Image: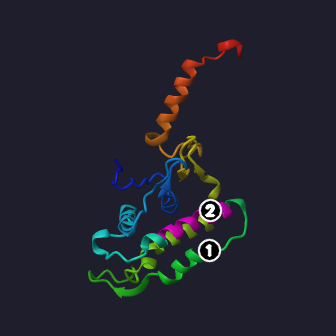
């Protein structure tokens, strides 16, 4: 029987752009894609805090555009980390077509003028523009040396290591850290030092 339940979104990266890249994860033998369909893409954006899903009509093609953005984001991250030149047509399209409307307004509470920013419209480009901005800031921010992949052998999740020691190894203790520590403990119990004449 096929499980038709949507795959869970994982927010472990400490960065919106990396969490978006992580919306496709898992080993090649059991890949997971959280953005399967337009509704799933809207649900992910809502879970990420980018929009209020209940107030947004679902534009056709938002999942396809999100998948194209995610593919390009992965390539851009790899190129930026390696210092290679790159092209960013999807990101730049979203930054241009989806840019929000910014207006100066007087406040209603008498606190003085304020700058108000709102989504341009309910197009797929506008809905995904915050992800393109987050990715642009990540890549241009210069802190890519602390972007890491989980050290678990069967995990592909990325994260931004913001720990003080900069020695984070796992996407999360709950998902992989405890599992890998238990596996290492069992391995030590089965193969103690010196077993079989080793050092």
Main secondary-structure element of the magenta-colored stretch: helix
Q: How many marks?
A: 2
Q: What residue is rendered at 63% in x and 66% in y?
A: 76
Q: What residue is rendered at 43% in x and 63% in y?
A: 35
- Using the rendered image of the protein, determine whether residue 14 is visible from the camera's viewpoint: no
Q: Split into 4 quadrants, where in the image is the C terminus?
A: top right
Closer to the N terminus: mark 1 or mark 2? 2
Tell me the quarter of the picture where residue 75 sits: bottom right
Q: Which residues are magenta?
A: 66-80
Side (left or right) of 99 relative to 146: left
Q: Percent from the top left, x then y, of residue 145? A: 65, 54
Q: Percent from the top left, x then y, of residue 94? A: 51, 78
Tell me the quarter of the picture where residue 152 sits: top right
- The disc at residue 77 is 2
Q: What residue is rendered at 53% in x and 69% in y?
A: 69
Q: How is the image coloured?
A: rainbow
Task: Tell me if residue 46 comes above or below residue 179 in the rendering.
Answer: below
- Secondary structure under badge 2? helix
Q: Percent from the top left, x then y, of residue 123? A: 40, 80
Q: Are marks 1 and 2 in contact (CB under 8 Å)?
A: no
- Using the rendered image of the protein, determine whether residue 92 is visible from the camera's viewpoint: yes
- 168 or 105: nearer the eye? 168
Tell me the quarter of the picture where residue 147 sits: bottom right
Q: What residue is rendered at 43% in x and 40% in y?
A: 174
């Amino acid at each position: 029987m096929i499980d038709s339940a949507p795959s869970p979104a994982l927010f472990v990266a400490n960065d919106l752009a990396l969490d978006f890249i992580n919306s496709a994860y898992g080993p090649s033998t059991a890949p997971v894609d959280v953005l399967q369909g337009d509704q799933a893409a809207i649900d992910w954006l809502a879970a990420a805090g980018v929009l209020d899903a209940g107030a947004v009509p679902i534009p056709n093609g938002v999942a396809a555009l999100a998948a194209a953005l995610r593919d390009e984001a992965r390539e851009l991250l790899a190129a930026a980390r390696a210092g290679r030149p790159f092209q960013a047509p999807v990101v730049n399209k979203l930054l241009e077509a989806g840019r929000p409307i910014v207006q100066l307004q007087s406040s209603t509470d008498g606190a003085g003028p304020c700058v108000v920013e709102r989504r341009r419209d309910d197009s797929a480009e506008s809905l995904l523009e915050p992800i393109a901005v987050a990715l642009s800031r990540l890549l241009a921010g210069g802190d890519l040396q602390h972007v890491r992949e989980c050290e678990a052998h069967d995990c592909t999740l990325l994260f931004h290591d913001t720990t003080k020691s900069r020695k984070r190894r796992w996407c999360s203790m709950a998902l992989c850290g405890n599992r890998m520590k238990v596996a290492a403990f069992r391995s030590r119990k089965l193969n103690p030092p010196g077993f079989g004449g080793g050092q």
